DNA sequence: CCAAAAGTGTTATATATACACCCATGA
DNA sequence: TCATGGGTGTATATATAACACTTTTGG
């Protein structure tokens, strides 16, 4: 406290938007709070930054506690800083955006935090400005998924092109032409044929692909065009 | 301080990346600090969030103090929160990204803050993690300018297509084909011919355009493709 | 053999690129 | 009249969008 005596110290929270995909719907991992304040209401998973903890480490800690997962896809999204956003005390919240492979999560940890996977449409009212955070995250998901290959983060290690298509259709709530979608995805060179077929299917079995990790990393920041041009006008 | 007794309160700073364009080079507005800490060294313009001030209002205040401008293009970029980033005390810094029309700024205010416009190439060493912030902002400028019509924010109200092209060439450090660039920009429908010509030119006078504000606002979030496809692989 | 989902091919259209010529201006 | 920079046109390549048929599978 030597150099900046008069400035206000503020609580710095971290809130996490955690997206998953069950093959049909985009889901959010939300917490029904069994602790104060706002006990009994729904919120995003969050916490405060520890004294000597980097922001990104704080986010990783909170995500690990809830899901049991490390090395998941996380981006810092935006910091919410309205003076009035938390009625109890001035708090700034850094929102992180996470995509996880829904089958990988530790369901015991989720249960013990009183958390649930809830579809976007069915999401309950949330505390504070958490609804705005979710809206912002959905916009970001649509924006980013149209340009960068982040969809894979929501699917299992091995996935089929029809699965990928259902994911994109869920993200944008539109039907996509199978043939054009397939050609576009395969032309990125990011997909490797595993030589196996999806055994769950009741009809013709789809080819299982995996991501070419090297190409994915090398080309992640390039722009792609995963969506039909007609979609690109929605932010 | 009722509800969260044990959490750490942290200083929340705001730092502003302020870009300008002088017709030739992209410039940053940087401050040579005549105050402690790190007096005599260069930094971004910044300050702390006030007790009852929204984050975005804090950024607007800091930008107004330095430039005398309101209603400029500002985006929240990223929050830097390494525990060690400020050696004096734990501080989190929310970085804002601003684009201004360089001729509009209040040069008296800039002088009184000991600030200067410095080209990106000539920028001095900066304090703390400010260099990382600048690098991040440059990436963001390139990314965003390729997809959204933010270039106009760096040019005067009335501008010519060759001016716009020089701006894009400065942003990406590449030469662009005049004819294709012109056609691409005009085809967006965002440019309105003012009927006037640039009088400064020593040769043929270029047409002065202004931005169609309504279309700009309506279509801001659409994706465009302002750069040749060959450029789109650089993030 | 039938329904359901997967896989593949073709064609028309739109867009991007590469490139060359003419025009206006002031020195 | 010449050098400099502004404005426009076109042919080619590439990418996209729209669309139909065949294959595999389990029941």
Image (tube, coloured by chain):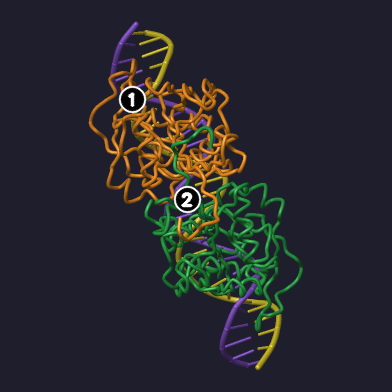
Chain colours: A green, B orange, C purple, D yellow
Between residue B88 and residue A184, name the one nearer to us: B88
Residue visible at 59% across and 73% down in the picture: A22
Badge 1: chain ID: B
Between residue B17 and residue B178, name the one nearer to us: B17
As helix, strand or loop, the secondary structure at mark 2 comes to: strand
Between residue B70 and residue B159, name the one nearer to us: B70
**Marks 2 and 1 belong to one chain:** no
Badge 2: chain ID: A
Residue visible at 63% across and 54% down in the picture: A188
Check disc 1 and report the residue beneath it. B103
Q: Marks 2 and 1: CB-CB under 8 Å?
A: no
Relative vertical location of residue A172 with respect to residue B209 in this rendering, above or below: below
How packed is label 2: few (under 14 Cα within 10 Å), some, or many (20 or more)? many
Relative vertical location of residue C22 with respect to residue B57 in this rendering, above or below: above
Measured as percent of width and height from the top left, residue C10 is found at 56, 63
Measured as percent of width and height from the top left, residue A26 is found at 53, 69
In this view, the mark in front (2 or 1):
2
Between residue C25 and residue B155, name the one nearer to us: B155
The disc placed on residue A79 is 2
Measured as percent of width and height from the top left, residue B16 is found at 45, 35
Residue B83: name its quadrant.
Answer: top right
Residue A193: name its quadrant.
Answer: bottom right
> Residue B224 vs residue A206: left or right?
left
């Amino acid at each position: 406290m030597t150099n900046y005596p008069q400035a206000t110290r503020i609580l710095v929270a971290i809130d996490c938007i955690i997206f998953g995909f069950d093959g049909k719907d985009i889901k959010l991992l939300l917490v029904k709070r069994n602790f104060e304040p706002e006990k009994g209401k729904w919120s995003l998973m969050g916490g405060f930054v520890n004294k000597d903890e980097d922001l990104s480490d704080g986010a990783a800690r909170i995500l690990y506690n809830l899901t049991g997962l490390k090395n998941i896809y996380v981006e810092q999204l935006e910091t919410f800083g309205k003076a009035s956003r938390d009625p109890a005390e001035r708090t700034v919240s850094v929102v992180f955006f996470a995509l996880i492979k829904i089958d990988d999560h530790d369901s015991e940890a989720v249960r013990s935090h009183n958390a649930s996977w809830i579809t976007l449409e069915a999401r309950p009212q949330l505390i504070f400005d958490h609804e705005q955070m979710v809206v912002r995250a959905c916009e970001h998901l649509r924006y980013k998924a149209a340009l960068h290959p982040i969809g894979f983060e929501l699917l299992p290690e091995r996935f089929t092109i029809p699965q990928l298509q259902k994911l994109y259709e869920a993200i944008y709530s539109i039907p996509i032409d199978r043939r054009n979608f397939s050609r576009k995805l395969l032309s990125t060179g990011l997909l490797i044929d595993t030589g196996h077929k999806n055994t769950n299917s009741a009809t013709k079995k789809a080819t299982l692909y995996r991501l070419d990790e090297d190409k994915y990393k090398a080309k992640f920041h390039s722009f792609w065009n995963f969506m039909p041009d007609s979609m690109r006008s929605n932010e």
